Image: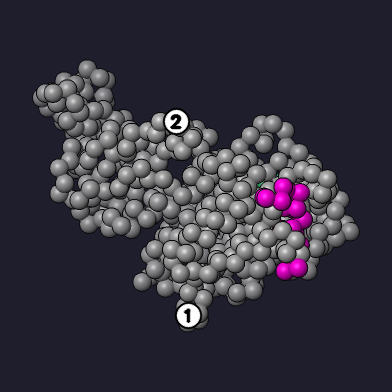
Amino acid sequence: MPRADLFAPHDAPARPVRLVGPDVKLDGAAAAWAEAQGFRGKPGQLLLVPGPDGTPAEALFGTGERFEPARCRALGAGLPTGVWRLEGLAPDLAGRAAVAFGLGTYRFDRYRARPDAPAPQLALPEGVDGARVADIVAAAALTREMVDTPAADMGPLQLETIAREIAGAHAASLTVITGDALLEANYPSVHAVGRAADPARAPRLIELGWKLDQTALPLVALVGKGVVFDTGGLDIKPAVGMRNMKKDMGGAAHVLGLARLVMQADLPVRLVVIVPAVENAISGDAFRPGDILATRQGLTIEVGNTDAEGRLILADALTRAGEHSPELTLDFATLTGAARIALGPELPPLYTDDEALAADLLAAAAEVDDPLWRMPLWRGYRPAVEAEIADLRNDPAGWAQAGSVTAALFLQRFAPKTGAWAHLDVFAWNPRGRPGWPEGGEAQGLRAAFRLLETRYPR
Ligand code: BES
Ligand code: MN
Ligand code: ZN
């Protein structure tokens, strides 16, 4: 949750944050204080400078050779409560700096006996649309908060409830198919993966629709992996691998945050959001290695490993998305550990065979400091997801090795045949805590995707 209003009016009384690069000469008391404190203007270095009464009168913020607006996350995290203004900020970077400041104020204190002090506020820089920036920051905060919330308090019902609240606030429709009704409604793979969970945490297919009656508008589908906890199933994960698996609904958290943002911005699109929400649990009714699952699309899948559950539920969800004939489909999923091996935790692999979409998404990513890295849907590895006694297998053959690629190739078999499709294999987590990037949930590719949609579908 954003802890206070992010912005104060442009002309509100505010203490200055001075951006200090190598060529900035400090003078007087600030220079002496900086010297005494070892402040050298290194990138991200923050120093509060006391006034005559001993309280912070201003702040110095190091920029290094080149000011990177994303570093302003450290200001949102490190400045004390109160209103601050950024001094010496190039106007073309003000929007990015404001978003970063807002992202930096995120703290997950829901489970603390005493909540943290209120976040600092930023006097709205000239030319920045405060409402838009606040909505973007709030979208990322929703995603992060959902990821950070323990699985006990973020089950399939909670995903449904959050989707319902978002739908209600924007006159969107919401339909939810739960438990054995999934079989009736033909979502066999969502049911198979989720059926072992406690009845109160039964699997469900959550579908939000916005402006669907405005058939002249282009239709965008967002699909998010909603595994509220991934034990691995009967192919149970070892302790280290299971520890953070509350974050396995990260894809769902991304698309719900993104969908809310699209609706707040009132982009001229129809929107369909599909979240298969399941707990990959262990019980007598759990799906098993060797089981062959039916899918909504008709292809059968031999389960080689119950821990490759995300692609199973996404198969049915992507098929459902295709039934709306979308012009554009984006899916977000914490799909593979292999993505992190390939690119590390900060750089989500992006997969698409649509060159224009790849170019536009990468450009958008760069514009909003929300990096993505394109990876190939390499045709040569397609046979790795074909099975001996079924159409597909969910555990790719070992020879292909590239686990994030083969997972994407698996999804591609179910992606909508209309329009373009992109898949983001997100980590949704900061493993390394540092000022502005606390250890915990992270939104990745959400702002890039919003920028893409804003650009493609201007109001
Ligand atoms: N949710 C995991 C992937 C994951 C693990 C994402 C760690 C981020 C961090 C997924 O369901 C999974 O377990 N995938 C397996 C697939 C394998 C069994 C084919 C993996 O990546 O090891
Ligand atoms: Mn898994
Ligand atoms: Zn998973």
Which residue is more in the foreground, 122 or 192?
192
Badge 1 residue CB within 8 Å of ligand 3: no
Answer left or right for 452 relative to 383. Answer: left
Q: Is residue 373 left or right of residue 127?
A: right
**Residue underneath mark 1:** 214
Observer able to see residue 1: yes
Whether the magenta-drawn stretch holds residue 43 is answered as no
Gap in Å between the C-alphas at discs 2 and 1?
47 Å
Residue type, mark 1 in image: Gln
Which quadrant would the C terminus be assigned to in this image? bottom left
User: Within the magenta stretch, is there residue 193?
Assistant: yes
> Which quadrant: the N terminus?
top left
- Taking the spot 62% from the left edge, 68% from the top edge, the residue there is 321
Most foreground residue, 155 or 85: 155
Colour setup of the view: one colour
Residue occupying the point 28% across, 39% down: 120
